Image (tube, grey):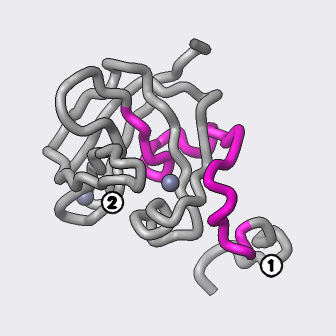
Amino acid sequence: MSETIPVTGRCHCGAIEFAARANPERVLICHCADCQAFAGAPYRTNVMAEEGSFALRKGTPKVYIKTAESGRRREQGFCGECGCALYATSAGEGPKVYALRVGVLAERASLVPSAQIWRDSALPWADSIGDLPAIPKQP
Ligand SMILES: [Zn+2]
Ligand SMILES: [Zn+2]
């Protein structure tokens, strides 16, 4: 396993905070339809945390169990106050490996994706936003 770095996560309202060690070489964009729905966005970006490194620092996330087409059950952790998606991990007992939602991490700018998965369900315009007019802030 490559070097991991310390990361900290915080939801928008601040009710939930967590820390973990994340692997900057395992940052993935996911274009699956579930990620599109959960994120309310064209795709979602995740980073894998080192096993056993995830630690809640504040609050208790709400958990929604998603059952995939494969039957695999995954816990989706989110803030029950502001709705921010925080992580996914395996449901039930056993070692938990967390996939952290990069958008809630303070270190997000330096967590650069190395691949995109579920490309078959990518939105047709997902690659072309670089061609759009770019306005620095809310116009
Ligand atoms: Zn919140
Ligand atoms: Zn996905």
Query: Which residue is at a point 63% across and 49% down the rendered structure image?
Result: 117
The disc, 2 or 1, on the residue closer to the chain's N-terminal end is: 2
Q: Quadrant of the N terminus?
A: top right
In the depicted view, which residue is nearer to us: 85 or 67?
Answer: 67
Relative placement, left or right, of 35 versus 123 is left
Horizontal side of residue 89 vs 128, given as left or right:
left
Instruction: Say which residue label 2 marks.
Output: 84
Q: Amino acid at mark 2?
A: Cys
Circle 2 packing at 10 Å, graded few (<14), some (14-19), many (20+), is: many
- The verdict on residue 102 being magenta is yes
Label 2: which secondary element = loop
In space, the residues marked 2 and 1 are separated at their CA atoms by 27 Å
Bounds of the magenta span?
98-126
**Res 8 label:** none
Circle 1 SS class: loop
Coordinates of residue 99 in the picture (x, y in percent): 43, 38
Pick the quarter of the image with the C terminus.
bottom right
